[in-house]
Amino acid sequence: MSRRVVTVVAGVLALVLVVGGAVAALSALASSRGDDRGSSPAAPSQAPSREPVGDQPDPGASKSPSPGLDTYYSQTLDWSACGQGNECATLSVPLDYEQPTGETIDLALLKVPAAEPDQRVGSLVVNPGGPGAPGTSYAASAAQVFRDRLTDNFDIVGFDPRGTGESDPVDCLSDTQLDAYVAGDPDPETPAETQAYAEATQRIGAGCVQLSGDLASHVSTVEAARDMDVLRAALGRDRLDYFGASYGTKLGATYAELFPTKVGRFVLDGAVDPTLTNRDLNLQQATGFETALRAYVQNCVDETSSCFLGEDVDTGIAAIKTFTDQVDENPLPTDLDRDLTVGNAFYGIVAPLYNRDYWVVLSQALRSGMGGDGTLLLQLSDLYTSRGADGYTDNSTEANYAINCLDDSSSITAGEVPAQVAEFEAASPTFGAVFAWSLTNCSGVQTKAAALAPTITGAGAAPIVVVGTSRDPATPYQWAVNLAGQLESGVLVSRDGDGHTAYNSGNECIDDTLESYLVDDAVPEDGLEC
């Protein structure tokens, strides 16, 4: 569920253009965005500042970790204009790092050049998470995602990780099959529903191998991290400067373990705890989304004289649960070519929980749904899964499955789920059963990773800033605490607030701290609270 935040945010911004009444409210929210501002950051400790790197490569940047990879590490990127002032290129990496002379993958790159070239610090490689989200889209949205201090001083460089976007995308299902997969009941209650759920998990697992071949075994986080080091060399940098959000924090932490001496300025925002078992990850994420939903309902109760969900939080939560149960029984009509099913309703509800600014859109979608029109909730579900009017606009849903299940293929059977439900529903009365059933999702996987995930300590790396938000639904705050503790050079920065990830969310303390670190090497105090 650690999904592509920027894709959802950009999509919701587009959606409100047709939502009508939500436009003015959303604009007001976006302009104020100060309801969770913390205090000014504590005086940071100063690390030696680096001079702007200019365009000359660092000495030794292209030295490869093994002779067989020399060809990849000595690449020169051929940047060309690709619209809106951006530049694009491709990077060649081996499909299998154990067979560097074999098949290759071309990774799509997009660069937004620094707005102030004379102040340029270097290249900031960025990843939005997922796993499965295209990094090129993230970089292309730099003006919305990052504030001026970063876009003035850095070339923002995004890449589509192997198997995603335009980087040899993994394919597992046809669009029709993927529609059914997303729309399916995520909490089966009858034998027929359970059978359909089991068949869907088997179908996607088999499909990845049938449609993608050897690629399905080579889209792991470890391999993507190795690709990032090839990218570092191609950018001419001796150290990698990196901003990773959500799953991007796992990718960054893996890089720090594999290449600790190549770590430059690293921000890991909305951290993932790589030590969690699949069960614990899902249980804690269920709790995170329940916390976010309760915060949303509380806001409705507090901010409106008559909240449409009820007079208190428990009543509001019960109303949402009743609504989804009704959709489960009777899917709602929409203005699109599909009905709103309970699966789509689930995604439509959780998508706006990623960002407090879009709670107003969730309210309008729920109002419409409770009035019998499922159009807005289906549109939100489509945004979450990159479903356009004519099919899927990227492979992020399939890549999310392929990468997650390659990293950790552990799974339980459908018969084992009922024993888990009570604990999951205690953690999340609204979403618990859905997350309990997700423990079976990798049961259909038919391949295994070519590279095993390492234990992550990042020993020998420069300071790595790990950021957590107190009421983050997708990556609970404790995960940031854990990752910062696991990394020998981890520096924990905390934001008190709602929504997924901390940077550029209206908290000046967070923004100033991270920008000072990335631009000036001003390492924040470990444990800073904003």
Image: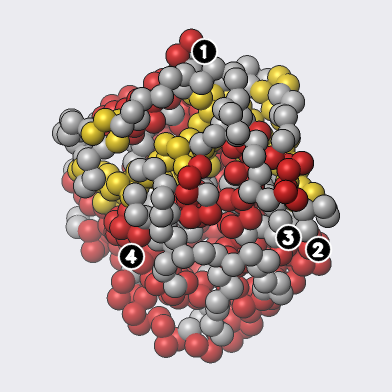
State the residue lying farthest toward the right.
102
Q: Is residue 111 left or right of residue 46?
A: right
Query: Which of the numbered marks, if any, corresponds to residue 376?
Result: none
Q: Position of residue 355 (x, y in %)?
A: 38, 43
> Which residue carries the number 4 mark?
287
> Which residue carries the number 3 mark?
98
> Which residue carries the number 2 mark?
213
> Which residue carries the number 1 mark?
117
- Of the two numbered discs 3 and 4 on the same chain, state the one appearing first in sequence: 3
Alpha carbon of mark 2 to alpha carbon of mark 3: how far? 17 Å
Judged from the image, the secondary structure of the residue bearing numbered disc 3 is loop
Q: Position of residue 389 (x, y in %)?
A: 68, 42
Q: From the viewer's perspective, is the residue at label 2 or at label 3 nearer?
A: 3
Q: Look at label 3 and name its amino acid.
A: Glu
Q: Are marks 1 and 4 in contact (CB under 8 Å)?
A: no
Alpha carbon of mark 1 to alpha carbon of mark 2: how far? 44 Å
